[in-house]
Image: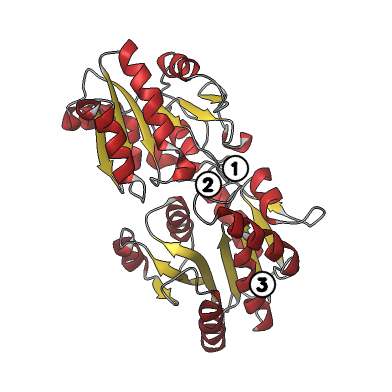
Amino acid sequence: MYNMGHKIYVCCYCEAWGSGGIESFCISLIRQLDRSLYKVDIVAARKLSGFYDRQLEELGIRLILLSGSTKKCGDNYRRLSYLFQCRHYDVVHINAYHAVTLLYAQCAKKSGIKTVAVHSHSAGIKKGRGQLLKSLAHLLARYFFADSPTVRIACSEASKRFLYLRGQKVQIIPNGIDVERFRYSQLQRDRIRRRLGIERAFVTGMTGRLCTEKNQAFGIEVFAELKKERGNAVLLIVGEGETEHTLRGLVRNKGLTGSVIFYGASRHVSQLMQGMDVLLMPSETEGFGMTAIEAQACGLPVVCSDRVPKEAVADERLVIRISLKKSRQEWVKALAGAVRQKTCGLRNTDYDISTTADAIKSIWE
């Protein structure tokens, strides 16, 4: 056991810092820490937005930026090496989306840091321009830097297989959430629906970063079919990202402008979920699917692709997993038949952030 007379100094590395799921996870995790025992710096190669600036300030967390680009691996490596010489961290916890990030685990190990934990959060390479080159770099890094971490963590079996070699010891720790914050509230539900003017609507929600891997374009296609069957259907899209312009164009082309709400990024996703009737997750790839857990915590049914790992199914009453190869009508049928619940059994389970924090702290200590 670590000598707790000494405050544990942790470097929490994220490739990019913005408003996504991993940032939310890091903030929730840090809130569980006793700040008299732990000191955490968040280090990122690039900052995407100031969405969490206020929370970091409230928590007394320093955000340290490297080169400003995720592509400048050599520059980021040198800056990290210098940072490790200056800060004398006890633990480096690297949140990884691909194997090239293992390079920074090697940097930490070479700097003499004893606990170098790599935490896999992804299950695939992002589709689009440069995908082939990125896949090749991932495969090479996966082998060349395989021995860099001293501790290997994954949020699901899929994320474990994606980042680590077969036979390597990996600890599976689901991405927990603040279960109490997502507890069902009829008062909040009525309030949010009234504020958005959707009191009588059948509300389908999509939350998360607007990007190709989350596949919101497919979700809009499905919603267009749902709208034909349920005239009171409304689609509430919560999040921001690089595909927003394309998605807005798709909504206009399908004549859905009056039925789709682009809410933007929000710190109040738990409240917005209360106002929904079903959550739609047509993801192309998911390392874990924390949004699905958040939905289940407030009794919100989830219709998701089978790319969302089985580990994200906490309550089988609430989750329907469907192949993206299935027809739009099968997706519509699942959405239309969704039934909201008012109870949640996630407290003190592996999906509770307090449980996750205990597992992470045992590694750091």
Viewer-proximal residue among 147 and 70:
70
- Seen in the picture, residue 156 relative to 51 is either above or below; the reply is above
Give the residue pinned by disc 3: 115
**Residue found at x 56% / y 36%:** 308
Secondary structure category for the residue under label 3: strand
Residues packed near mark 1 inside 10 Å, few (<14), some (14 to 19) or many (20 plus)? some
Callout 2 touching callout 1 (CB < 8 Å): yes
Q: Which residue is at the far top?
A: 229
Residue 78 in the image, given as x and y percentages of width and height: 55, 84
Disc 3/disc 2 C-alpha distance (Å): 22 Å
State left or right for residue 152 relative to residue 249: right
Callout 3 touching callout 1 (CB < 8 Å): no
- Seen in the picture, residue 2 relative to 26 is either above or below; the reply is below
**Residue found at x 32% / y 45%:** 244
- Seen in the picture, residue 174 relative to 325 is either above or below; the reply is below
Q: Give amino acid for label 2.
A: Gly
Secondary structure category for the residue under label 2: loop
Disc 2/disc 1 C-alpha distance (Å): 7 Å
Residue 299 position by quadrant: top left
Specify the quadrant that holds the C terminus: bottom right
